[in-house]
Image (cartoon, rainbow, N blue to C red):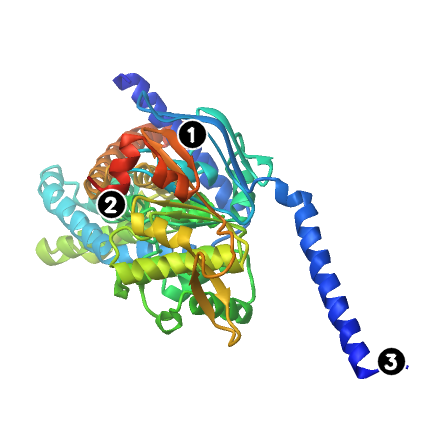
Amino acid sequence: MNFIARFLFELQEMSLLAGRSARGIFKKPHYVPESIAQMDYIGVGSLTIIILTGFFTGGVLTLQTYQTLESYGAVDQLGYLVSISLVRELGPVLSALMVTGRVVSAISAELGSMVVSEQIDAMRALGTDPIRKLVAPRILALLVTLPLLTLISDVMGIVGGWAVSTFLYGLPSSMFLNSVRDGITTDDLIGGIIKPLFFAFLMGTIACHKGLKTEGGTVGVGRATTSAVVMASIIVIIADFILARALQLILGTQT
Amino acid sequence: MMTQDSIDRTIDNRVSDQAAESTFREVDDTDRAIPAIEFRNVTMIYDGRKVLNDLSFKVMKGETKIILGGSGCGKSTTIKLVLGLIKPDEGQILVEGEDITNYDENHMMKVRKKLGMIFQEGALFDSLSVYENVAFKLHEQGVLEEDVESEVRRMLRFVNLEDAIDKMPAELSGGMRRRVGIARALVGDPKIVMFDEPTAGLDPPTARTICELAMKLRDLEDVSSIFVTHEMNNLDYLTSEYAVVNEAGEVVFEKEGEKLCLINSKVLMMRNGEIIFSGTDETLRRAEDPYIHKFLRGH
């Protein structure tokens, strides 16, 4: 099979999996305990890295832009610049990439191990659909937790920016916070929530697809995991560009 | 007025009449004439190679079909086809007379409820305890927890592992994992069970225990099964011994010939995806095919 045929075949397989798992979320049986356990693992488990990533991204953004803004006499716009960058772009993308590193790899490795040890076949033999039992709860958990994690990351980024501007450059807190409040619009917040929803669905589908298609024993598990992380990271960045443009057109936020 | 002696005689006659009636009913039972599993000219191609070539055989109700053959000859593929885990490229597969060849995943889920499968390494769910593994099917069906527990304990008693109920799969030995796998497969009392090399890599006493479980299912539970193996001692056990319940109510295993019996096991030998022998163990041992000779003697 040549590259294009392989790509189209994989795209078709992934679309079918996405469709079946989406149906699995809404149709009975609902695996509520599994979904909650996954939300705990993905959401609560990723909190530390999301808080640290958000805080230091906001901090470094302030660090890199303060002097430029000062030379133009626009330091009062610092909060606006930091918050808009975080809410529109850096928050959703960095959160998605951090969760990809932690969760996509874990899902892919877990499902891959289950495939090579015949646990998936055993599940099917026992009359249970692995897509409903394993895939749907993971995608649902990502859909619920990633927007929340992104929101936390945004807030922590603004806190990081405020901390650097106040304690390192001595900018009054009110100036920074007022420009944040004046800068962020409802459309920015909507965009900041819509993006993680798409990212979550794509990341979950890629992780589960790669895991369930694992071949070649334990070596195959490693290959599937690497491939899932690489593919999910690239797809997140490409999807971010497409979504950014789509949101500009829909919400009219290009200015 | 009837005497005690005549009453006893009447009861004896009634009992023997009932026994004869049930025997005739069993013989006349047309349902038993339908094979539990039937393969009709099944061909399976993988990566351009014929993994199975025009495979046809039947497993009758209550029969154990022992599939022998070297590694990679298509034994495991055969039982995965019965479960619908993979689909054939040609031919038909029938389970209890129902053609399942073109069933989609939703239809297969219903068929699989009638089947039990014991995987090579047990295939236990690592994140679940022994109890949760055995209870998996019942939990999925929404059975009440007190009913689940009694059924799980009954199954674990059957495989003699009730003490391991709270253990995790990582704490079990290879033989224990297989036995938990058997307990899990037997929940819901499936009438068709498939064993995929259940004794591979086990010490002889544990392998013997697994074969005894298969014999109990065949002789005491009327279960039809496919027993895939490449180990000759499995063949010896399954074709020369049978399980009976003695006066004390214990299950004992008797050798063929000790009493008149008909051991309901047939042998099928495969090579390169084709059947090279089908029949009883006696005819297998008399077969003149050099490959069969080599396989039976190991040299």
Name the side, left or right, on which B114 lies relative to A186. Answer: right
Q: Residue furthest right?
A: B1
**Which amino acid, by three-letter code, is at mark 2?**
Ser
Provide residue B226's location: percent of width, then percent of height: 44, 45
Residue at mark 3 = B2
Give the spatial CA distance, label 1 vs label 2. 33 Å
**Which amino acid, by three-letter code, is at mark 3?**
Met
Query: Does residue B249 show up?
Result: yes
Q: Under tag 2, what secondary structure?
A: helix
Q: Under tag 3, what secondary structure?
A: loop
Q: Looking at the figure, which quarter contains the N terminus of chain B? A: bottom right
* Residue situated in front as seen by the camera: A56 or B216: B216
* Residue situated in front as seen by the camera: B136 or B235: B235
Label 3 crowding class (10 Å Cα cut-off): few <14, some 14-19, many 20+?
few
Name the side, left or right, on which B190 lies relative to B66. Answer: right
Provide residue B63's location: percent of width, then percent of height: 51, 47
Disc marking residue A181: none
Label 1 crowding class (10 Å Cα cut-off): few <14, some 14-19, many 20+?
few
Residue at mark 1 = A250
Q: Looking at the figure, which quarter contains the C terminus of chain B? A: top left
| Marks 3 & 1, CB-CB < 8 Å contact | no
* Residue situated in front as seen by the camera: A125 or B193: B193
Residue at mark 2 = A105
Question: Mark 1 or mark 2: which is in front?
Answer: 2
Res. B67 image quadrant: top left
